[in-house]
Amino acid sequence: MNVYEPIFFWGKAAPHRTALAFPGGSVSYAQLCNAADGAAVAIARAGFRPRELVNVVVVNPAFQIILMLALGRLNIPCCFIKSAALGAELGLKVAGSISEDPNVRRETLRSLHVDHNWFISKLGAENPPRPEPVDTADADVVRAVVTSGTTGQPKALELTHGAFEARLRAATLHPDSGRTLAMVAPSSSWGYLLALKILRSGGAFCFAPFPDDALNVCESVRVDVICASVAQAATLVVEQKKLPRELSSVQRVFIGGSLASPLLVQDIQAHLCRNVGVGYGATETGQSASAPVSTLGAGEGAVGFVHPGMRIEIVDENDRPVPAGRSGTVRVAGPGSAQGYAKGPASDGGEFRNGWFYPGDIGSMSREGLLTIEGRASELVLNKGGFKVNPAAVEDSIRREGRVADVAVLAGTSPEGAPEIWAAVVPKASFDAEALRVFFENKLGAVAPDRFLRVDAIPRNEMGKIQYKAVLAKLSAPAA
């Protein structure tokens, strides 16, 4: 089944219900579906063909969703990347482009230039022309997505209608209907899943570009659920402390993308909502585990219980499952998982093996199926005394003290060439590197960072994960 079909049902069954809400406006289901149909006719007339990948270069989330639905009507898969040339580097065969930038038109065989007025005309049409129906199979590609995780090296995946149907079934803790504020854009894999989940159930998909706008939407629209990356949730807490909004309608805050410190969870509970949910997943597999924090107990790094239909195992260096409670390498499998990257097995780097995806995390699993993430295997470093250090644990300890706004811990080198541990920090107030070093040496002992280095911001990807290579580049720049 085409993953978009249930959305068009609500265009007929509840045409006046709010589908999209944003600062200063909203779009009903009738407007959304009519706009998608009108856009689909225009796209077909421009020569775009079923099953040929189209790159969409449009910023506004509402316009992104209109184009997703329109292309879906025609069984045309889409992606959201900077250019078709980048798509080719990643192994994607981009046949067409739809863009707000006229220069993008020359990149592909077929192209369509769109602008604000183009979309407004589609939204304002009451009886738009209807596109010819195109049959869709579960095996047809619906989205190509790009993931880089913490490596900074982009990789592309092609995901089918069937894969997203499986992901929607597995995402049990995600909201179905009601009014949900999504801080993650629908162009991302998680944002796309949220948009599908909410709109297919007849709910309102709410979004805003900045924390103050997001909280204003929560207050004015009476939002039920907030979904955000850990970094985005932190910005909402800061904004709410600065200028409190009335958020009594919010029933749950769901955070993901990276591990949340207990201090941040406490802040979310105190200033946004008492009911907080956390989750674990990857672009390659979709959401794989989640739970309300109230069920996780006191253990640090717990990210939830394995979702129905998903399989998560902890294995040793020989890929043998380890006993409950023991640390090892995390691997994930499920019906919604990708089978490899678009560039083929040679570029997989060992992450896809024998039907499993290895996200590069170190973790453990309780007898009850509670997954705990202890850190990234690729980010374990040796300090000068020979101790193995888990950066995530050190980062969490530093954040707990409340002296810095953000921190990234990584391997560095002294001027003499000796290995060191560095902490890149965004200070809350004044910055005294030596005072921080002495304080945390007394607190953490041998695993304490050797150097504290000030940065204006910690580079993170769209899901809030620290991009350690970008941090190191900042610290290694001549000015630093």
Image: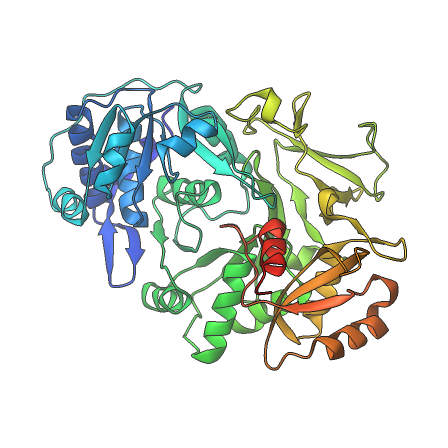
Q: Residue at x 22, y 37 (%)?
A: 36
Q: In screen coordinates, is 387 left or right of 343? A: right
441 up-or-down from 205: above or below: below
Quadrant assignment, res 383:
bottom right
Residue 121 drawn at (x, y percent): 12, 45
Q: Residue at x 14, y 48 (%)?
A: 117
Quadrant assignment, res 442:
bottom right
240 up-or-down from 205: above or below: below
Q: Residue at x 15, y 42 (%)?
A: 122
Quadrant assignment, res 299:
bottom right
Residue 154 drawn at (x, y percent): 52, 37
247 up-or-down from 254: above or below: below
The quadrant of the image that shows the C terminus is bottom right
382 up-or-down from 13: above or below: below
Residue 124 drawn at (x, y percent): 12, 46
Residue 255 drawn at (x, y percent): 55, 55
Q: In screen coordinates, is 123 left or right of 169? A: left
Please state the total of marks drawn on the protein image: 0
Q: Nearer the viewer, residue 118 or 367?
A: 118
Residue 424 visible: yes
The quadrant of the image that shows the N terminus is top left
